[in-house]
Amino acid sequence: MSIRNSSVRWGAVSQLLHWLIALLILTQIALGITMKVFLHPGPTFLAIIGVHKSIGVTILALVVIRLLWRLMNPVPKLPNTLEPYEQTLARLTHAALYVILLAMPLSGWIGSAAGGHPVKWFNLFTLPMLVGKNRSLSGVMGDTHEALAIGLGLILVLHIAAALRHHFVLQDDTLRRMLPMGRPGTVAELTGRQKA
């Protein structure tokens, strides 16, 4: 497998970044629900929120790297079987996903700084305080962070549903070309079935 993308397949670097970010997002969702539903302020809550912030900063860095890598590489073309509106929807969904993945950690970072709470990356170093202490701004950023989390959840459901539709209904390479062991070829070809 090539490290770089091609016009028909995502390269190893893009795949690694995609799946690593996906794993970290799932971890963040689990941590967020745990903090919101099961924990009260205390040592365990503070420890988990520290990990949550560290993973958020990691996601922010990885998304920036992914965007830079994407700018330096070809992007695999969308299947020509898609209608023009479906291609537009796919592009808008990906753009919205990137915007949210940048905005969420930034809103958390700003909210923490405005609340007077430094953001440490796995206790190895402390990030700069982006703003001064401001209780009102901290509240707004907290609300923004939660709204973005809901938006991210909706877009992820759409993203996953679209990938599964491509694989099982349209039977094209969209999902397979993001898998490390995937190879070009339709599901019908791989299973010996031909579409009517």
Image (spheres, rainbow, N blue to C red):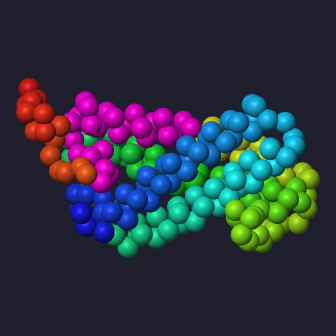
Residue 34's quadrant in the figure? top right
Q: Who is closer to the viewer here, 106 or 79?
A: 106
For the N terminus, which image quadrant? bottom left
Q: In this view, does 136 lie above or below 196?
A: below
Which of the two residues, 159 or 50, is positioned nearer the viewer here?
A: 50
The location of residue 171, given as percent across then percent down, is 21, 36
Question: Would residue 11 be found to the left or right of residue 131 on screen?
Answer: left
Quarter holding residue 173: top left
Give 107 or 179, whichever is nearer the viewer: 179
The residue drawn where x is 56% and y is 38% is 153
Q: In which quarter of the image is the C terminus?
A: top left
Q: How many marks?
A: 0
Residue 70 in sight: yes
Q: Which residue is drawn at 88% across and 66% down?
A: 132
Can residue 8 be found in the magenta stretch?
Answer: no
Where does residue 100 sit, x and y in percent of width and height?
59, 51
Query: Residue at 43% across / 40% down in the picture?
Result: 159
- Position of residue 141 relative to residue 30, above or below, is below
Residue farthest along the top direction in this orientation: 196
Magenta highlight on residue 158 = yes
Q: Which residue is drawn at 37% across and 57% down?
A: 15
State the image quarter where residue 129 is shown. Answer: bottom right
Above-or-below relation of 61 to 41: below
Q: Main secondary structure of the magenta part?
A: helix
- Span colored in magenta: 153-180
Residue 64: percent from left, percent from top: 53, 66
